[in-house]
Structure formats: C-alpha cells, structure tokens
Image: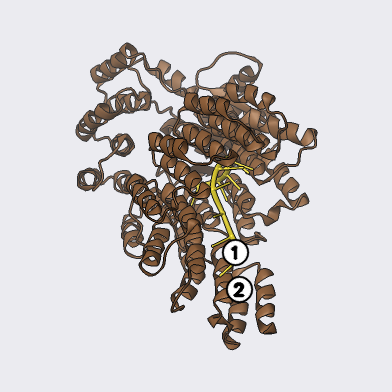
DNA sequence: ATAGGGTTAG
C-alpha cells in the first residue's frame, strides 16, 4: 500500500528521463506497474511533464494489455504536443477500436489535427465528436474553432462558433485568433469589438494578429491602448519587431521593459535574441547571455536554444558549441537541430553529420527540420552521396514524408555540385509540384556553373509562377553578363524597368560598441559612409599594389570597365569591412551580416584583406558563413 | 489522476 504512495511521490519529483527510468525499475520490482492508476501517472509523467521522454512513454504503453481512457488520452496529448500529430492520430484510431473517447480525447486529438493542418481529418473528427455527442462540449467546441481556423476553414470555424450553445471568453478569443491566423484582420477586429467580456488574453490575441500581419505601427498604437499590459503583451511586441526586421525597436522595447521593471519572460528573451541573431549583433547577445545567467534563464531550454542559434548566426560557432554542451536543462530536438544547422552554415559538414548520429544514439527522434539542416550541410560541402542517404533515411527509418523544402535541398545538392541535369530531372520527377523556390535554386546553380541553355528553360517555368521577382531577373541578367551576352542583359534590364522592378538593394551590417551600422551599396555621402569610403579607397590601393585585379562579372550592365569596377567596389560588405577597420581595435574579429549572397569580387577582396592586414573577417551572407583568415575562406570557395 | 484561447528557438 505505501509502495503506491512512494511511487506517486517519486514520480512527482521526476525531472528527467533518467529519474523516470529509476522509478520504472522500482515499480517493476514491486509489481506496481500493473496498477492502472500508477501506470497512468507514469505515462503522464513521460508523455507530458518531462521533455524528451515520449518514446519511453510509448514503449511503456505498448506493454500494457488493456490501457484505459486516461492512458490513451495522455499519450495522445503527448504526441500532440511533440509535433508528431500523425502518431497522435494512430493512437486515437486504435483507442476508438477498444474504448469510447471522451471530451478530453477530442480536445487533445483536435489539437493534433490543427497541427497537421489537415482539413479532411478535422472534418472526420468533428463528425465523430457529433456521434459521441461531445461536439456541444465547450472545450471541444473551442478546439474545433481553432482547428478549423488552423486548417484554413475559417467559415467552418465561424459556423461552429455561432452554433456553440455556450460561449465563454476563451471561445471568443479562439475565434478572434482564428481570424488573425487566417489573415483576416477585419474579421478579427469585428469579433473583438463584439466581445461581451474581454480579458488580457483577448487584447494579446488581437495584438499578435496585428504583429503577424506585419502591421507594426498599428500594433504599437494598439499596445498603448491595452489597459494592463503583461509580459505576454511585451513579448508579443518584441517578437513582432524581430519578425518584421525592426531590430532596433526590438532592442528598444526589451530595454524599456527592463527599465520599467517588468520581468522578462522566456518569450521576450527568445524574441530579443532572435533580433540579435538576424542582425548579427554579437555584443548585445553577450550582454543578454550574462543577463540570462544572472536571472536563472539558463535552465530554460527554449532560451538556450535561441542563444545557441544567436551565437552561431553571429559567426561564433565555438560559443554555440559551448552553450550546447553545457546546457543545464534538457536538450530538445531543436537544440540538436540548431547545433547541426550552425555547424552546417560554417561548412563543418562532417561535424554536423557526426552530431546527427550522436542525436540518434542519444534516442531523440529527428524531425523534418533536422533533416533539412543535415541536407543543407551536405549540399554546402558537395557531399552528394551522403545527402542522398539522408534523404532516403528520413522516409525509411523515420516515416517522414519529404516536404518541398527537402526537395529544395536535393535540387541544391545536385545543382551546386554542377550536376544540373540531374537536378532538373529530379524536379520533373518530384511527387509534389515544384514551387518558385525550387526553380530559383536551379537557376542559381545555372548561374554558378554558367549554363545559359538550362537557365533560359528554367526561367520559363519560374516566370509562370512568380513573374515579378527582381532577384530572378538579376540572376538571369548576371548569367548573360558572365557570358558577355550584352544584348540579352539589356533586354532583361528593359523588362525590369518596364515592370518597375527595382533591384533588391544589398545591405550589410556591422556592430561597433553595441550599435548596428548598416551600409547600402553605392550609397552616398554622410559622416559614416564618408569614413567608410575613405578607408575603402586606401585599402583598394594597397590591394592593387599587392597584385589584386578587380573581378566584375557579377555586375549587371555592359558598361566600361572602370565603371563596372566602380560598382563592385561599392558593394555594401566592402564598405562595412572598411568601416570596421577604422573603428574597431586591432585584433578584433570583423563580423558582417549581408542580406544577399556575396559576389566573387567581394569574396576575393575579403580573402586578400585577411592576408594583407592580418585580420579575421566573418561574413554571413544569405546562404552561409565565410570566415576569412590568412587569405583563405572557410567555404573553400564553394558557395 | 487530464483539458480549451495568447507570446517562444531550429
């Protein structure tokens, strides 16, 4: 009898999978695992309360001869929360063969349906709910509203909502949120206006709606109207700014939050870290790191993941590894995946693959994004065979259906390595229709390998889907320019002007004393750029003296050589580096973040600067990291 | 013994 009590209290104090295993051994010995209540608690502990123990929960569950509703519900809940909606569904189906589902079952399984975004499944579950008379239950109704909204059936969400026999604030909030998620701000505002009662969540839902729609200014006004803002309101703003590339505002709101004494929570911290990560704000990231340690956030996995990602996107993969290895809390799939992605971005493909294997050994199940990261590692290192192996492994070993992103990685894998026709045939054989990104990837590969014929063909498919992408025009124009086909270049240019497409301006950012400086190609003259231009001139002179010849084939027009040279010499990354060289002390690593991909000339110049000035430059471009040192780059000129 | 809506990293 008191074995039972002991078991219960032991379970309550479990904090990790290892603890669980000990309790399991104890329960096994004392035969308590046959007690359904204890067994239920045990599953709850593994599947819901403890992270990374869902596999263990399932194995335990399978050994039980007649699981009860509670056990099924708990396992379904665990699967729904662990982004394996498919497994939640199989469990639910199995349960329905043996037992009657209750309102809890529906609440959990509908969440999984929402997660899997499968409208058909959602409808079927709705029908089943009716059959059991549970569709009128408030909780079930509320999840139905969210599910339909999430699956793109806003009208259905509305209908369920209107027909609910009883509606509380939570149901209203779900409806407002549904409209927001469906991108219908007007509808959301209307429902919000009709609400009989509003709680703080209602305001926060609406606020998040504005932010997600990119309506940053409206959100700022709305934020001021919230009667009593809480941590969620603040973090919604911070996250919103970060997602809409308003990094300075994200930093500002975070500081303001500190100043007025509002406690930061994990979301505001991950939000501000994400702003750092996107902007490459290494110095500010270090301050946040210190703050985390001081205020105990190091125990929270999500915050650690964000920090790890920030360090690796700031080009400091060593710090990222340190965070990863020393994380006091449990590592999640996201931790492992971020680390794999971080290594991949820096070109450490072997290490990335080793980590992937370690993760499998550790007993964690890689998900779709883990595979994207490891495929990315392969494509950026030219490891074709390995890439193919992972691609088949995800289906065969883990039953993960490849998404369009995975196919994109494969196209990139073949394309980057110059196997353009293999890439092309791969696209034609894909079981899902290719999107613009797929074709654009191949177009990029055509550009790297100078294949005009294929590029023209690819362009046709691409322009049918997305005719107004300026980047595609520029890419095609560059392919012609590289081959000296100036007439074709001119015609692309003409179609760009007639369509009023502007070249997406290249910018680069660099942090000096926690301030981000942003440089735009060819931009003239203010106090800051003046300084950069002067220094750049001096650098170029010195490099030419050392034997450097400008490479201008990545430039659009058919202009005189000096003019072309002038255009590349003003690329934003050169300005940022020059500026950094005047402002940062000797011996400091120069960290630059660029929004586009680096051109051949800039790449060459960076290598030379690193050699001539004995200086390390870390450049993050749109697709990867380049670490320049002693005249060499970590990408081994493969990018 | 369990639950529905809001902010969170890859």
Cα distance between the residues tagged 2 and 1: 9 Å
Horizontal side, residue A250 vs residue A43: left or right = right
Question: Residue A175 at what x, y percent from top left?
Answer: 50, 36
Q: Which residue is more in the foreground, A285 or A133?
A: A133
Q: Is residue A73 above or below residue A371?
A: below
Left or right of A101 on screen, residue A124: left
Contact check, label 2 and label 1, Cβ < 8 Å:
yes
Which residue lies under the disc numbered 1?
A: A50
Residue A490 x/y as whole percent = 28, 16
Q: Any idea which chain is the yellow one in this picture?
A: B
Question: How far across and down, in percent of the image, does residue A563 sit?
Answer: 42, 16
Colour pattern: by chain
Locate the N terminus of chain A and report the quarter of the image it occupies: bottom right
Residue A102 position (above or below residue A151): below
Residue at 37 percent of width and 54 percent of height: A131
Q: Residue at x 65, y 78 (%)?
A: A7
Q: Is residue A500 left or right of residue A426?
A: right
Answer whether residue A311 is visible to the viewer in this image: yes
- Classify 10 Å Cα crowding around label 1: few (below 14), some (14-19), many (20 and above): some
Q: Which mark is residue A219?
A: none
Chain that appears brown: A
Report the residue marked by disc 2.
Answer: A20
């Amino acid at each position: 009898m008191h074995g039972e009590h002991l078991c219960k209290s032991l379970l309550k104090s479990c904090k990790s999978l290892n603890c669980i295993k000990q309790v399991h051994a104890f329960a096994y010995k004392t035969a308590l695992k046959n007690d359904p209540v204890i067994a239920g608690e045990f599953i709850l502990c593994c599947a819901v309360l403890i992270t990374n123990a869902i596999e263990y929960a399932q194995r335990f569950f399978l050994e039980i001869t007649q699981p009860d509703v509670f056990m099924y519900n708990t396992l379904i809940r665990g699967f729904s929360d662990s982004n394996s909606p498919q497994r939640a569904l199989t469990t639910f189906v199995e349960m329905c063969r043996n037992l009657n589902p209750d309102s809890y079952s529906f609440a959990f399984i509908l969440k999984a349906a929402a997660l899997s975004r499968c409208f058909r499944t959602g409808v079927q579950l709705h029908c089943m709910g009716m059959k059991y008379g549970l569709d009128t239950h408030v909780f079930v109704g509320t999840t139905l509203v969210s599910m339909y909204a999430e699956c793109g059936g806003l009208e259905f969400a509305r209908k369920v909502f209107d027909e609910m026999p009883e509606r509380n604030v939570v149901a209203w909030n779900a409806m407002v949120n549904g409209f927001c998620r469906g991108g219908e701000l007007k509808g959301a505002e209307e429902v919000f206006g009709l609400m009989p009662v509003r709680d703080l969540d209602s305001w926060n839902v609406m606020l998040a709606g504005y932010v997600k729609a990119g309506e940053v200014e409206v959100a700022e006004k709305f934020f001021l109207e919230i009667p009593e803002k809480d941590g969620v309101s603040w973090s919604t703003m911070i996250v919103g700014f970060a997602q809409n590339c308003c990094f300075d505002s994200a930093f500002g709101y975070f500081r303001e939050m500190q100043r007025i004494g509002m406690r930061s929570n994990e979301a505001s911290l991950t939000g501000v870290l994400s702003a750092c990560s996107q902007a490459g704000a290494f110095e500010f990231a270090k301050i946040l790191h210190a703050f985390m340690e001081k205020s105990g956030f190091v125990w929270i996995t999500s915050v650690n993941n964000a920090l790890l990602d920030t360090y690796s996107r700031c080009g400091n993969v060593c710090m990222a590894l340190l965070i990863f290895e020393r994380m006091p809390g449990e590592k999640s799939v996201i931790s492992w995946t971020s680390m794999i992605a971080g290594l991949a971005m820096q070109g450490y493909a072997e290490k990335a693959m080793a980590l992937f294997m370690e993760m499998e050994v550790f007993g964690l199940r890689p998900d779709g994004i883990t595979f994207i990261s490891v495929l990315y590692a392969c494509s950026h290192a030219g490891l074709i065979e390995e890439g193919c192996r992972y691609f088949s492994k995800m289906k065969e070993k883990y039953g993960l259906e490849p998404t369009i992103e995975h196919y994109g990685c494969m196209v990139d894998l073949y394309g980057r390595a110059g196997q353009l026709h293999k890439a092309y045939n791969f696209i034609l054989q894909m079981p899902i229709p290719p999107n613009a990104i797929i074709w654009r990837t191949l177009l990029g590969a055509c550009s790297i390998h100078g294949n005009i014929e294929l590029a023209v063909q690819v362009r046709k498919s691409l322009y049918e889907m997305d005719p107004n992408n300026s980047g595609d025009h520029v890419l095609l124009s560059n392919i012609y320019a590289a081959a000296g086909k100036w007439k074709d270049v001119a015609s692309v240019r003409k179609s760009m002007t007639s369509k009023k497409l502007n070249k997406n301006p290249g910018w680069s950012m660099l942090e000096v004393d926690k301030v981000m400086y942003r440089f735009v190609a060819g931009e003239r003259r203010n106090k800051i750029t003046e300084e950069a231009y002067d220094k750049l001139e001096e650098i170029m002179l010195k490099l030419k003296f050392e034997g450097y010849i400008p490479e201008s084939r990545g430039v659009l027009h058919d202009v005189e050589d000096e003019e072309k040279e002038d255009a590349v010499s003003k690329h934003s990354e050169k300005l940022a580096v020059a500026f950094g060289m005047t402002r940062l002390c000797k011996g400091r690593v120069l960290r630059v973040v660029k929004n586009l991909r680096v051109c051949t000339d800039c790449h060459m110049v960076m290598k030379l600067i690193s050699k001539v000035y004995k200086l390390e430059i870390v450049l993050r471009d749109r697709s990867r990291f380049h670490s320049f040192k002693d005249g060499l780059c970590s990408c081994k000129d493969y990018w």
